[in-house]
Image (cartoon, helix red, strand yellow):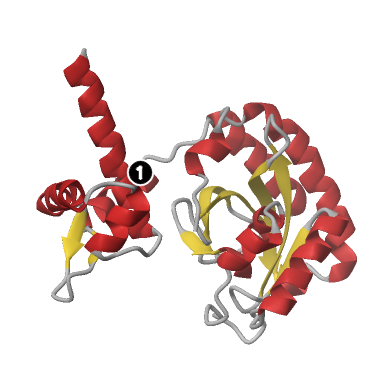
Amino acid sequence: MADSTSGAKTLERGLGLLDHVAEGTTRLDDIARAAGLSRSSTHRMLTTLVETGFLSLGANHEYQLGIKLLQLGSHAQASIDVSRAIQAELEALSARTLDATHLGVLVDADVLYLAKARGRRGIEMMSHPGIRLRAQNTAMGKVLLSALPDIEAAARFDPEATPTPNSVRSLEEFLAGLAMTRERGYAVEDQENELGITCVAIGIPAARGHTAVALSVSAPSVHLPATRYADVLECLRDAQTALNPLLPAGLETYWGASP
C-alpha cells in the first residue's frame, strides 16, 4: 500500500513538472523551486521525462515539451467525438440559418473546434473538428474569454496574432471587446480570423454556471450583416437550450487549461 501511494505521488509530481515547463519555467533550478522539490529529485524526474519523450533538453540546458506530448495531443484531438444528438442539433441550426455552425471549447489561448455542421451556401471555410484557432480572433473564443477575469483573459492575448487587417492589435481594444461581449451576451467576429467570413457566437453555461462551451454561426460576410444578428441570435439561443442537456458533464474541467 505504501509503495502504491509513493508511486502515485511520484506520478503526480512528474505531471506537475510538465505543467511548470508548459507555463514557461524551463531551467532545472527554477523548475525545482516552482515544484517545491529538491534539485536532485527534480533532476531525476526530468531525466525520465526526457528519456520517454515527454520533454526535451536543449543545448542551452532548458527543458521544453517533447514530441510525445504532441503525439498524444494529436491522438486526443482525433478521438474527439460528439454524440449523434449533438451533431443533429448543429445540423438543425445550420439548416435553419443556411450557415455553418460550430461547437468549441477554450484550450490555453485557442479555441478547439469540437464539431461542425456545414452551411448551405456552397462556400467552405477553414474550420473543421479538431482545429485550434487563436481564441482572440474568433467569436467563440471571445465568448469563452469573456467568461474569465480580465487578468486571465489578458494573459492569453497576443498582439502579434493578427491573421487579417481586422484582427485586434492592442490589449485595450481586446479587453474593451470582452466587456462588450459580457454586456450584450454574445460575441461577433467580423473578418478577424478569415477575410470574408463573419461569425456570431454565444456561450453554453455548464452546471455550475461557468461558460464552458461556445456555439457559433459562421457565414460569408455578405450574408451576415449586422441587421441579421438578431435573427441568428434567436436561432443560436434555441439551439443552446436544446444542446445544454446533451453536453457531457465536466466538459469544462476536462478541456479547460491555464495559459
Q: Which of the 4 quarters of the picture holds residue 168?
A: bottom right
Q: Nearer the viewer, residue 226 or 214?
A: 214
Which quadrant is the N terminus positioned in?
A: top left
* Residue 206 appears left or right of 36: right
Q: Which of the 4 quarters of the picture holds residue 172?
A: bottom right
* Residue 185 appears left or right of 102: right
* Residue 109 appears left or right of 196: left
Q: In the displayed structure, would residue 250 be above or below residue 151?
A: above
Q: Nearer the viewer, residue 160 or 218?
A: 160
Q: Position of residue 257 (x, y in %)?
A: 49, 49
Q: Which of the 4 quarters of the picture holds residue 66?
A: bottom left
Q: Name the outermost residue toward the top.
A: 1
Q: Nearer the viewer, residue 154 or 46?
A: 46
Q: Residue at x 79, y 56 (%)?
A: 186
Q: Residue at x 61, y 70 (%)?
A: 137
Q: Position of residue 121 (x, y in %)?
A: 66, 62
Q: Amino acid at mark 1?
A: Ala
Identify the residue position indicated by label 1 in the image. Answer: 76
